[in-house]
Image (cartoon, rainbow, N blue to C red):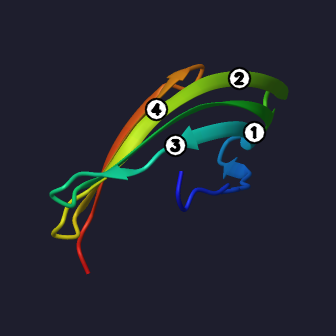
Amino acid sequence: VDGGGLDQRYRCRVGIGNETVVSVPLGVIAGWSGSSESGVIFSPYGGGHVALDFASGEGDSVGFSGAVDLGGDIVLRSGWMIRFGATFGDREAIALGFKLPG
């Protein structure tokens, strides 16, 4: 694919409340980007990840989970972008977002 490349992202999540949770994810995501004759760009992606979770508080625990991610971006000629995604598996989630032009 012209202009293709590898995008690397690293992250670790920490949540503090009644318990402290540290989540270390590791995954692989592949995507593609194409445009129509009208100038609309569609970029779907899919992949999977696993996460190692450490929780402290009452009943300290270590957990391991896996999930599959699917989603995509649609960029309109006006500059608006619509992003959607879903995660299936141990961490189910759904998301929808918009980016305004400018």
Mark 4 and mark 1 in contact (Cβ < 8 Å)? no
Mark 3 vs mark 2, CA separation in Å: 23 Å
Mark 2 vs mark 1, CA separation in Å: 11 Å
Q: Give the residue at x 58% y 56%.
A: 4
- Residue where numbered disc 2 is placed: 65
Q: Secondary structure at mark 2?
A: strand
The mark nearer the N terminus, 4 or 2, is 2
Q: Can residue 59 be seen in this snapshot?
A: no
Residue type at mark 4: give it.
Leu
Residue 27 sits in quarter: top right
Q: Is residue 90 above or below residue 24?
A: above
Residue 23: x and y, percent? 74, 41
Residue type at mark 1: give it.
Leu
Looking at the rendered structure, which numbered label has been put on residue 70? 4
Q: Give the residue at x 67% y 49%.
A: 15
Quadrant where the image shows the C terminus: bottom left
The mark nearer the N terminus, 2 or 1, is 1
Q: Can residue 100 be seen in this snapshot?
A: yes
Q: Which class describes the residues within 10 Å of circle 4: few (<14), some (14-19), or many (20+)?
A: some
Mark 3 vs mark 4, CA separation in Å: 10 Å
Q: Is residue 17 above or below residue 80?
A: above
Mark 4 and mark 3 in contact (Cβ < 8 Å)? no
Name the residue nearer the viewer: 7 or 68: 7
Looking at the rendered structure, which numbered label has been put on residue 31? 3
The mark nearer the N terminus, 1 or 4, is 1
Mark 1 and mark 3 in contact (Cβ < 8 Å)? no
Looking at the rendered structure, which numbered label has been put on residue 26? 1
Q: Secondary structure at mark 4?
A: strand
Closer to the camera: disc 3 or disc 2? 3
